[in-house]
Amino acid sequence: REQLLAVGKKAPDITLEDPSGKSISLYSLSGKKVVVYFWASWDKNSRQVNKEMTRVYSMFRQSGLEVYAIGLESYRDTWLGAINADGLKWINVTDYLHLQSGAVTLFNVSGSLPYFYLLDESMTIKYKGNNIPDLIAILQGQI
């Protein structure tokens, strides 16, 4: 699985639901740079990084950056509360399966949250990890 998700490989597609229940496919964002952002409302590190990700999003969204934030959640109200409290204005999706989410397996997310994949316009992986300064540096070189 790790080799399939290496930098330079095409990311897998996934379709999850936003808070209103609308299904949104990752590949519907083809043609844009996308940060696939794994986080959780119950995770202290994720909540702190939400502030940094909001800043990254505001820096690069005019250049066409999208964030496809996959919440590893169990409860809609808790998830929505975190989205609203943290002012997350990007695409927020979940399957309500917490750490058993199919997205965790599909993207081989292990270790601590949050975790990111940066995809280019053709859905090719350009970065993966959890280092915001590295993510910003790569975005500055691409956008």
Image: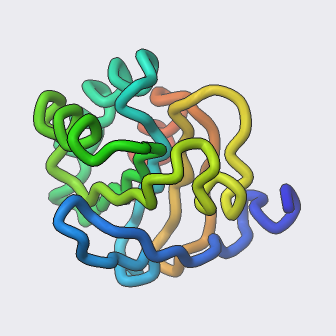
Q: Percent from the top left, x then y, of residue 102?
A: 62, 62
115 w.r.t. 17: above or below: above
Q: Percent from the top left, x then y, of residue 7?
A: 72, 58
84 w.r.t. 26: above or below: above
Q: Percent from the top left, x then y, of residue 42?
A: 40, 25
In the rendered view, does 131 fall on the left or right side of 46?
A: right
Q: Tell me the quarter of the picture where residue 110 sits.
A: top right
Q: Is residue 111 visible?
A: yes
The C terminus lies in quadrant: bottom left
Q: Is residue 59 visible?
A: no
Residue at position x 67%, y 58% in the image: 107
Residue at position x 52%, y 55% in the image: 118
Foreground of the two, 69 or 8: 69
Q: Across the whole image, how many numbered discs are drawn on residues?
A: 0
94 w.r.t. 73: above or below: below
Q: Percent from the top left, x then y, of residue 27?
A: 45, 81
